[in-house]
Amino acid sequence: MTTVLEVRDLEVAFDTRHGRLKAIDGISLTIAAGEILGVVGESGAGKSLTGSAVIGLLEPPGRVTGGEIRLAGQRIDDLPAAQMRALRGREIGAIFQDPLTSLNPLLRVGDQIVETIRTHLPMSDRAARAKALELLVAVGIPAAETRIDHYPHQFSGGMRQRVVIALALCAGPKLIIADEPTTALDVSIQAQITGLLKRLCREHRTAVMLVTHDMGVIAETADRVAVMYAGRVVEIGPVDDVIHRPRHPYSVGLMASIPSVRARAAVLRQIDGAMPRLDAMPSGCAFHPRCPQRMPRCMAERPALGADGVSRAACFLTLEAVNA
C-alpha cells in the first residue's frame, strides 16, 4: 500500500525558563492510503500534540526539535509557515473535538465550504457551491439543498460535526487528522460519525489519524492502533491484535479497564498511579513506576519497539519472550 504519512523519530519540546521539556520523545509511525490509524492513551500521553505537530499547529513555545514528518514522500516539518498554510486544507484536513471552534457562527455553512474549496481549488463560485452541496449529501446532511444556507447554530452537535467532516474533505486531502471527533457527542451519534469516517476513508482512499482516549471508538473504526504513554509509542499493531492480545503492560491495563457487557464486576480495574510530569520523567521505561511486572532493568534502560508477530511493543518482557 502507498504510504501517505511517515513520522520518523519525532521529538516535540517546550522551552521554558526551567529548561527544555520533551513532550514527544522519538515516536515513529506510518499511515497508508485508505487506512485509519487510531492513536490512544491517557490525557497527557502526547496524542493531540502528535496530531498538532503533523498538521503544523503547535502552540509556542512548543516546536519540533527532532525527527521528520513526511507527507506522500515530501518532508513537511521544516516548511515555511506560508507553505504549511497552503498545505493545510489542500493536502491535510482536520476534524476537531468541538465543531463550533471550526465553524464561523456568522457565516452560512455553505459559504464556509465554498470559501474553503475556492481557496484550494481553481473553481468558479457556482461549481464550488455544487461541490459543497455534493459533500453535504455525502456526509449525510438531510435536506442538504435547504440546509446549505443555514447557520451553524441551526444544526445539532452531530450535524455540525458532519459539516466539519465535509469541510475537511472539500479539497480532497491525502490525510485527515481527527482529534477526538466524537467526544462531545452521545453514543448513538458517535456510532454514526465513526461509520461515516470509515466509509469516506475507503471511498476517497484518505489516510486518517484518529486521536482518541475511547477504546470503543478505536475498536469500531481503526485498522491499526498506536498506544502512547508519556510521549512515546509503547505498542503498535492491528487493532484486533492490540485489543485482544496486548503485549505491553500499559496496553494490558487499558484493555482491562474497559467494562465488559458479558461479565459482571463489582469493581472496575484501574492502573494505579498517574502519568509522569514532563519535568519529572523517570529513567528507563517511563511506565515502570506503575508497572506490576517491572524488573530492575526497566528502571535503568529504555526498551525499543520490538516485533512480536505483526505487533510491536516497547517492553523487555515482550523482547525476552521473542528472543527466548
Image (cartoon, grey):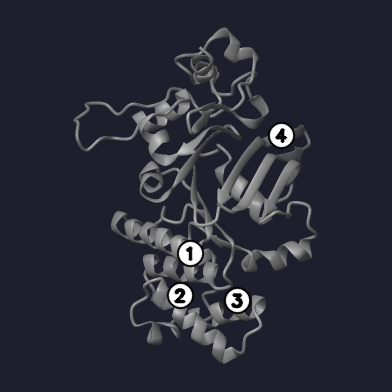
Residue 71 x %, y % = 67, 55
Eye-nearest disc, 3 or 2: 3
Q: For mark 2, what is the residue?
A: 152
Quick one: SS at disc 4?
A: strand
- From the top left corner, tell me how far across and down residue 135 is, in percent: 46, 76
Q: Which residue is mark 3?
A: 116
The disc at residue 99 is 1
Q: Residue at x 40, y 27 (%)?
A: 253
Amino acid type assigned to the residue bearing label 3 in the image: Thr
Q: Is residue 185 visible?
A: no
Measure the alpha-carbon separation of dots 4 and 2.
39 Å
Up the image or down, 142 lies above or below 24; here it is below
Task: Of the two numbered discs 4 and 2 on the same chain, state the one appearing first in sequence.
Answer: 4
Q: Is residue 298 left or right of residue 146?
A: right
Q: Distance from label 3 to label 4 (Cα)?
A: 36 Å
Q: Which residue is mark 4?
A: 21
The 10 Å Cα crowd at callout 3, few under 14, some 14 to 19, many 20 or more, is some
At numbered mark 3, what does the secondary structure look like: helix, strand or loop? helix
Indicate which disc, 3 or 2, sits on the residue closer to the N terminus: 3
Give percent across and percent down for residue 154. Answer: 39, 77
The amino acid marked with disc number 1 is Pro
Tell me if label 2 and label 1 are in contact, CB under 8 Å: yes
Residue type, mark 2 in image: Pro
